[in-house]
Amino acid sequence: MSGDTRIVVLGNSNVDLTSYVQRSPEEGETVLAESFVIGMGGKGANQAVAAARAGGSVAFIGSIGRDSFGELTFEALSKEGLNLDRLLQTDSPTGVATISVDANGANRITVFLGASGDLTSESVADAVRHFSAAKIAVSQMEIDQPIVIAGLREAREHGMTTVLNTAPYSPCSAELLESVDWLIANEVEAEALLGDLGGEVRLDLPVSKLLESMPRWAESIGSDLVITLGEKGAIGCRRGESPFHAEAPTVKAVDTVGAGDCFVGYFARFLDTGAPWQGALIAAVHAAADSVTAPGAQSSYPSAETAAKYAELAEWQGGK
């Protein structure tokens, strides 16, 4: 039921067509893949699944086609326990991502939005209103910015905490930033965003130096801020509080597809539990690190059965 929903995730859902290669092809070159899998993806759907596996009560707002990939997507998301009351179905083809992953786990991704492009500002605002009792609203930037703005604004109207993941990056309008409580970016996205806001920013610095700048960056963006740093973990800053670094455990990366989405879903989930934001950051870093040790996006996310260990990490009480 909509009244039971705590987290609303707006975004793209697609089917991932993933080839595993020794190395990515150069321009004009063909390489042979060693294996191939079909999986579930899309940044919005990924983040919704991650939040649900972390123990959240999650609704997903998106759009799929009335085709075989749409049926596959609906079945997969239903099995995750997501509320799909406002998952639209249209005559457009379901979105697809073609992905290649090299031997080091690095990936190259091309996304066709398909039916996700049928979302409108009106349909999204109406969907968010349907879940008006929710506490957290999450979006990304795979769908058009005006649609994201409509969803986050509506969420704000109902007192929800809004979380924006700036992936894939495009310049953020003032209207968008005004709708955000927590902004989550990776190093490249953060550098681009801060540069767009008029700052000369370098993120290839020691973490200690980055932490010194986090309060200033958060103020310039106008929201609380998280920057993910890959194998270095993540840094965060709630305005008015000291910045914090959550270190990542050492793991062997097999496939980094969807790791950022795993992070966002877990962070949102533990914000909703009332855990300290620093604890939510720690839990999200560890969950994302675990996800890169297995292939695929949603298929790599830690199972619901393992969520307890992340919940323990989220119970941060001020220690290192």
Image (cartoon, helix red, strand yellow):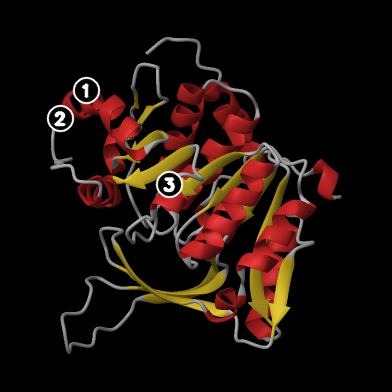
Residue 206, numbered label = 2
Q: Earlier in the sequence, mark 2 or mark 1?
A: 2
Callout 2: SS? loop
* N-terminal label among 3 and 2: 3
Q: Is residue 284 left or right of residue 174?
A: right
Quote the CA–CA distance across marks 3 and 2: 27 Å
Circle 3 sits on which residue?
177
Name the front one of labels 3 and 2: 3
Q: Which mark is residue 86?
A: none
Looking at the rendered image, the disc whose residue lies closer to the viewer, 2 or 1, is 1
Q: Residue 67 sits in which quadrant?
A: bottom right
- Measure the C-alpha gap from mark 2 to mark 1: 10 Å
Q: Position of residue 122 (x, y in %)?
A: 67, 67
- Give the residue number, with chain letter if any, for mark 1: 212
Q: How many marks?
A: 3
The answer to whether marks 2 and 1 mark residues whose Cβ atoms lie closer than 8 Å is no
**The one of 11 and 74 positioned closer to us in this rendering:** 11
Question: Label 3 sits on what residue type?
Answer: Leu
Q: Secondary structure at mark 3?
A: helix
In this view, which residue lies farthest toward the front?
Answer: 175
Question: Relative to 64, is 129 above or below?
Answer: above
Dot 1 crowding, Cα within 10 Å, few <14, some 14–19, many 20+: few
Pointer 1 with pointer 3, Cβ within 8 A = no
Describe residue 13's horizontal placement relative to residue 61 as left or right: left
Q: Is residue 191 above or below residue 26?
A: above
In the rendered structure, which amino acid carries the disc numbered 1? Glu
- Tell me if I can see residue 50 in this picture: no
